[in-house]
Image: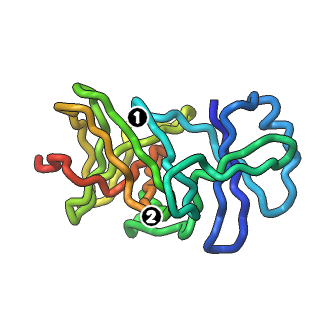
Amino acid sequence: MAHELFQIVSSTEWIVWLNIGMTQADFDAIDLPPGWLRNNALQGQPDASRFLRSPDASMDGPLTTKEIFGFVWQHPATIVEAGIQLDEQGLLVGTRVAKVHEITYRACRTVAVLVSPEGDAYVRVTRDPERRGETSTLPSGWRQFDYVTPDDLVTTLPNPTLVIRTNIRDSFQGPVAGLDVEP
């Protein structure tokens, strides 16, 4: 299971630290000082996912690592803008995340896609395991549908990526090019 911490550097920069080897008990036992937050547990939706480099690296390769709170953490992403209101009702909230992130959905996979009023497509990358419902409430002009991948869908998300959280805490990310988003 992966665990994430946020190191709040400033109001516009939160460093994301990832650990994939610790237990839930170890994660819960960390006594976080001010300026640190835990991310909620999330269920990944892609069949494969990998970070090609840390956001501050100039070339692909191993992620930057650092020992923090007695564990080795990787730096896959940095939040560069949070709390972006995407609609008047506050149903969708965006976060811009600097990251170099490749995701894969295998052929014949059903992928949830969120489409903006402008026609931009965002794929569901994570779900909250304790979500409050199965269907997101969407504002006017937005729509969600299931897309069946005819072939493997391998895409590197844009850098920065717009991460959209719905009212049931699903995370859609992109925009992703090349999807047929017509009704």
Between residue 141 and residue 107, name the one nearer to us.
Answer: 107
Judging by the rendered image, the residue that carries numbered circle 1 is 46
Callout 2 crowding tier (Cα within 10 Å): few <14, some 14–19, many ≥20: many
- From the image, tell me which residue sits under label 2: 160
Amino acid at dot 1: Pro
Residue occupying image coordinates x 59% and y 61%: 78
Residue sitting nearer the eye, 52 or 21 = 52
Report the amino acid beneath label 2: Pro
Q: Residue 6: x, y in percent?
A: 69, 55
In the displayed structure, 59 sits above or below 1; it is below
Outermost residue, top direction? 108
| Relative image position of residue 47 (x, y in whole percent) | 40, 30
Quarter of the image with the N terminus in it: top right
- As displayed, is residue 24 above or below residue 93? above
At x 52%, y 33%, the residue is 43
Quadrant of residue 89 in the image?
bottom left
Q: Which mark is residue 10?
A: none
Q: Are marks 1 and 2 in contact (CB under 8 Å)?
A: no
Which numbered disc, 1 or 2, marks the residue that appears first in the sequence? 1
